[in-house]
């Protein structure tokens, strides 16, 4: 309880709020701000966050589509106050995406497509 | 792929959106609507949803405080379109709570207090 007083308050927290994650900036590997987290997708059975739904805005001409990124692709950077994704632009551009008003069916097959593309599980 | 067509679309989904969880109604064991989920708290290390932060509104005179409920206390009821909490009012009333503008420190000790109170882990 003594040392934590001088620490950044966020560093003492074991949990984060879904409210705070939504809207948090996403940075590319070169440090450029490339978009933000819009919301999260959570596994119904295990209660685990599976994907961050990222909007890249005007970045790379990707418009307002939603790009699901496996949660473990995002590393929080205290200094920047945002998530860093260690992928190059080309790779992000080619990832699975959907239009805002055309929500996919979040079943195993779509999940496999996302994790398959990013090579994570 | 064949049988799912006649199912409620939500039932075919393995994942839920944090966007949809926020604002979802919470029902007590007697079927009365007692409040709604405001947001979720997520473990930083394992990416697991730990608690739903529930606002009971005017229920039981609980005002606008936030009550953290362990995520596994909530069971989704397709028919009602909301979460059911199988606890009596007395127990909910006595649970850990905080005022909206007085966010607690989400460390191990506070987590233990919540799970200890509800007898879950």
Image: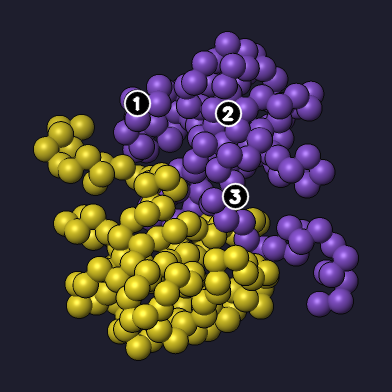
Chain colours: A purple, B yellow
Judging depth in this view, the residue of B108 and A78 nearest the camera is: A78
- Front position among marks 1 and 2: 1
Q: Which residue is drawn at 59% across and 74% down?
A: B111
A98 horizontally vs A52: left or right: left
Residue pointed to by mark 1? A101
Rendering coords of residue B3 (x, y %): 14, 37
Q: Quick check: can you spot residue A114?
A: yes
Dot 3: element = helix
Q: Quadrant of the C terminus of chain A?
A: top right
Residue B46 picture quarter: bottom right
Q: Quadrant of the N terminus of chain A?
A: bottom right
Rendering coords of residue B19 (x, y %): 42, 45
Residue B55 picture quarter: bottom left
Considering every residue shown, the one lying at the far top of the view is A61
Residue pointed to by mark 3? A20
Q: Are marks 1 and 3 in contact (CB under 8 Å)?
A: no
Mark 3–mark 2 Cα distance, whole angstroms, equals 25 Å
Q: Quick check: can you spot residue B119?
A: no
Q: Earlier in the sequence, mark 3 or mark 2?
A: 3
Residue A118: numbered disc:
2
Q: Residues within 10 Å of mark 1 (few under 14, many from 20)?
A: few
- Front position among marks 3 and 2: 3
Q: Which of marks 1 and 3 is nearer the N terminus?
A: 3
Name the subunit of mark 1.
A
């Amino acid at each position: 309880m003594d040392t934590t007083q001088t620490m950044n308050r966020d560093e003492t927290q074991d949990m984060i709020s879904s409210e705070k994650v939504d809207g948090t900036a996403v940075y590319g590997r070169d440090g450029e701000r490339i978009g933000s987290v819009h919301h999260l997708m959570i596994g119904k059975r295990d209660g685990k966050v599976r994907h961050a739904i990222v909007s890249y805005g005007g970045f790379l001409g990707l418009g307002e589509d939603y790009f699901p990124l496996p949660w473990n692709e995002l590393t929080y950077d205290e200094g920047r106050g945002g998530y860093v994704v260690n992928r190059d632009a080309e790779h992000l551009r080619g990832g699975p995406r959907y239009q805002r008003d055309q929500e996919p069916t979040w079943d195993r097959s779509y999940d496999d497509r996302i994790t398959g593309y990013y090579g994570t599980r």
